[in-house]
Image: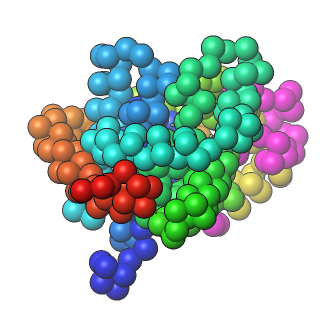
C-alpha cells in the first residue's frame, strides 16, 4: 500500500509520571503493532498534563520521559510522526472554536469531570475542557483510528460528536474517528485489583527495576488457599497480570496449573516476577541507551513537531475560512 492511501492513526500519552504496564498493554503496544499499517501520529500530551502538573521541572522531565518511553518500546521515528502536543499550537486555536459550539451541560457529562466533582476536587477550566482539547488533537490530523484504553472511550466519542456538530454548522470538514480498544486489555488491573493507574499507586512501571518488580508483585493480595488447593485463575490478580505476558498455549498451561492445585501463591508470584523481568529488562536497557543521546531524541521530537504542525496549519486554513475569520 502506498503511504498516501494508508489510514491515519493518532494517539497520545500524558507526561504525568512513569508509564506502567497498563498504559503499555492497554494502548502503547498497539501503537507499535500498527506502525507499519497506518500513517501514525503519536504525541506527548503536555497541554493535557497541565491540568494536573503545574511545576516547570516536573513537566519538562515528564515530556522527556515519554519521548524516551516511545522510542524504547519500539516506535520507529522513520515510520511514525512523534511529537509533543505543544509543538502544534493550532490545537489550542481549534479547541477555542470547539468550545464555542459546545454546551456546558454536555461537558458536565464527562466521566473525568464527574469523578473530580464527586471527590470534591478543585476543578480547573482546563480539566473541564479536557475533552475539547482531545477532540482537537484527533480531528486536526484527520485521524481514522485512535488506540486507547477503555477509560478514554468516552473522550473519543466527544471527538466524534464534535466533528458532527462542526460539520453540521459549517459544512463537511472533519473526518469521523473510531476508537480502537482491544477487549482483552481494555482495563489492565493494578496490583490491588483496581484499574492500574498512575493516580492509584498500584502500578508496575513499564521500565521498573528488577527490585521494583519484585516489590510490586509481592504486594499483590491473595486469598488463603493452601499450596495443594485448586485455585481459580480468573479470580487471581497474579494471573490476570501474568496472562498479559503469555500467548496461546503458555497462558493455557499456566491456567491449568492454577486449576489443578499444587502451586502456591508464592510460586505463582515467583513465576510472574521471572516473566516480568524477562519482558521489561531489554526495554529498560534500550531506554537507558537512548537516554545517553538526548540530542537525537530531541531532534526526533522537533522534526515530528514540524511535520504535525505543518499538516495542522493546512487544516486550520480551511477551518478559519469556514468559520468566517479569514477575510483577506
Ligand atoms: P493513567 O490512567 O495511568 O493516568 P494515562 O491517562 O496517561 O494513564 O493513559 C495513557 C493511555 O493508557 C490511555 O490510552 C489509557 O486509556 C491507557 N490506560 C491507562 N491505564 C490503563 C489500564 N489500567 N488498562 C488499560 N489501558 C490503560
Q: How many marks?
A: 0
Q: Quadrant of residue 163?
A: bottom right
Q: 87 or 185: which is nearer to us? A: 87
Q: Quadrant of the C terminus?
A: bottom left
Horizontal side of 136 relative to 82 (left or right) equals: right
198 vs 241: above or below: above
Horizontal side of 25 relative to 188 (left or right) equals: left
Residue found 63% across the figure and 50% down from its top: 158
55 vs 316: above or below: above
Magenta stretch bounds: 220-249
Residue 103 within the magenta-colored segment of the rendering:
no
Horizontal side of 7 relative to 81 (left or right) equals: right
Residue 240 within the magenta-colored segment of the rendering:
yes
49 vs 97: above or below: above
Q: 153 or 236: which is nearer to us? A: 153
Q: Is residue 326 visible?
A: yes
Residue found 14% across the figure and 44% down from its top: 299
Indicate the quadrant of ligand 1 in the picture: top right
Provide residue 104's location: percent of width, then percent of height: 68, 35
Provide residue 253's location: percent of width, then percent of height: 69, 59
Residue found 55% across the figure and 36% down from its top: 130
Residue found 37% across the figure and 60% down from its top: 321
Horizontal side of 45 relative to 202 (left or right) equals: left
Q: Is residue 185 visible?
A: no
Provide residue 1's location: percent of width, then percent of height: 34, 85
Provide residue 212's location: percent of width, then percent of height: 48, 25
Q: 237 or 59: which is nearer to us? A: 59
Amino acid at each position: 500500500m502506498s503511504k498516501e492511501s494508508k489510514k491515519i492513526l493518532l494517539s497520545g500519552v500524558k507526561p504525568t509520571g512513569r508509564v506502567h504496564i497498563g498504559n503499555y498493554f492497554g494502548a502503547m503496544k498497539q501503537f507499535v503493532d500498527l506502525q507499519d499499517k497506518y500513517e501514525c501520529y503519536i504525541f506527548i500530551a503536555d497541554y493535557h498534563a497541565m491540568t494536573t502538573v503545574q511545576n516547570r521541572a516536573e513537566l519538562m522531565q515528564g515530556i522527556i520521559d515519554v519521548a524516551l518511553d516511545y522510542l524504547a518500546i519500539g516506535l520507529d521515528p522513520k515510520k511514525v510522526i512523534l511529537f509533543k502536543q505543544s509543538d502544534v499550537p493550532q490545537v489550542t486555536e481549534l479547541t477555542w472554536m470547539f468550545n464555542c459550539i459546545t454546551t456546558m451541560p454536555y461537558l458536565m457529562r464527562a466521566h473525568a469531570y464527574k469523578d473530580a466533582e464527586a471527590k470534591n476536587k478543585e476543578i480547573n477550566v482546563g480539566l473541564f475542557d479536557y475533552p475539547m482539547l482531545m477532540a482537537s488533537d484527533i480531528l486536526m490530523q484527520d485521524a481514522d483510528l485512535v488506540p486507547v484504553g477503555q477509560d478514554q472511550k468516552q473522550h473519543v466519542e466527544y471527538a466524534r460528536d464534535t466533528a458532527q456538530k462542526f460539520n453540521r454548522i459549517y459544512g463537511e470538514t472533519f473526518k469521523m474517528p473510531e476508537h480502537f480498544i482491544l477487549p482483552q486489555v481494555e482495563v489492565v488491573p493494578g496490583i490491588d485489583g483496581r484499574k492500574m493507574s498512575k493516580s492509584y499507586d498500584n502500578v508496575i512501571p513499564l521500565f521498573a527495576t528488577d527490585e521494583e518488580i519484585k516489590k510490586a508483585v509481592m504486594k499483590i493480595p491473595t486469598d488463603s488457599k493452601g499450596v495443594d488447593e485448586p485455585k481459580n485463575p480468573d479470580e487471581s490478580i497474579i494471573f490476570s497480570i501474568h496472562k498479559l505476558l503469555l500467548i496461546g498455549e503458555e497462558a493455557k498451561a499456566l491456567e491449568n496449573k492454577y486449576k489443578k492445585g499444587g502451586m502456591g501463591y508464592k510460586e505463582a508470584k515467583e513465576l510472574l516476577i521471572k516473566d516480568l523481568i524477562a519482558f521489561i529488562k531489554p526495554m529498560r536497557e534500550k531506554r537507558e541507551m537512548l537516554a545517553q543521546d538526548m540530542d537525537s531524541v530531541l531532534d526526533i521530537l522537533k522534526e515530528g513537531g514540524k511535520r504535525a504542525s505543518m499538516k495542522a496549519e493546512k487544516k486550520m486554513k480551511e477551518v478559519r475560512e469556514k468559520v468566517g475569520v479569514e477575510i483577506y
